[in-house]
Amino acid sequence: MSRLVTTVHHSPLGPLRLVASAAGLRSLHFRQHRHAPPADPSWTTDAAAFTAVCAQLDAYFAGELQDFDVPLDPAGTPWQRQVWRALADVPYGRTTSYGALAARLGRPTASRAVGLANGRNPLSIVVPCHRVVGADGRLVGYGGGLARKEHLLRLEGALAA
């Protein structure tokens, strides 16, 4: 296993813990995120390794960036990775439903499986799982908490102020 590095980046929604491998960003979680992995004592703290992603996060929160462009290295099953790639295609300022995402993946009856994979997304914000809502448009299921999901969607203009 490659050496992992970590840092904490302060955002308008609270501290974000970032973890990266040599290949790219491995995870980005809020404090008290439902599926955040516990900190590992083998991780090395190295803020300099996250200069690009932190600059992009700051630009995103300032409303100046819509698409992240940093190397990613999420760990997950093949199905999870397929769902996460599809999440990356949901446009800034738009939302989709679990069912619509399942249909787009060619598995129209797999909305629950899409929801489970979405909930395990290790790259909050960068891979925009916050853009997935219930079939009726309600805000449901966000590992960082629904208040943060609402904030992100308002920031992007996907919800009225």
Image: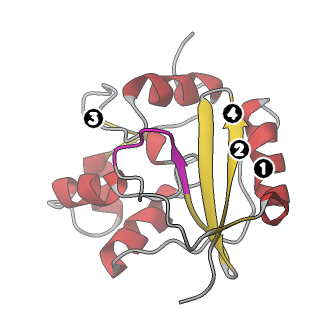
Magenta-drawn segment: 28-34
Give whichever of discs 4 and 1 has the lower sequence position. 4
* Residue at figure coordinates x 53%, y 90% from the top left: 1
Which mark, by number, is residue 11?
4
Q: Nearer the viewer, mark 3 or mark 4?
A: 4
Residue 65 is left or right of residue 18, and the answer is right
* Label 2 element class: strand
When asked about the image quadrant of residue 96, the answer is: top left
The answer to whether the residue labelled 1 contacts the one labelled 2, judged by CB atoms less than 8 Å apart, is: yes
Say whether residue 32 is magenta: yes
* Label 1 element class: helix
The amino acid at mark 2 is His
* Residue at figure coordinates x 50%, y 39% from the top left: 31
In the picture of the structure, the residue carrying the numbered disc 1 is 54
In the picture of the structure, the residue carrying the numbered disc 2 is 9
The answer to whether the residue labelled 4 contacts the one labelled 2, judged by CB atoms less than 8 Å apart, is: yes
The amino acid at mark 4 is Ser
Position of residue 46 relative to residue 145, above or below, is below
Marks 4 and 2 sit apart, C-alpha to C-alpha, by 6 Å
Give whichever of discs 3 and 1 has the lower sequence position. 1
When asked about the image quadrant of residue 141, the answer is: top left
Give whichever of discs 1 and 2 has the lower sequence position. 2
* Label 4 element class: strand
In the picture of the structure, the residue carrying the numbered disc 3 is 134
Give whichever of discs 3 and 4 has the lower sequence position. 4
Q: Nearer the viewer, mark 3 or mark 1?
A: 1
The amino acid at mark 3 is Gly
Query: Could you tell me if residue 92 is visible in this image?
Result: no
Mark 3 Cα shell of 10 Å, populated few (<14), some (14-19), many (≥20): some
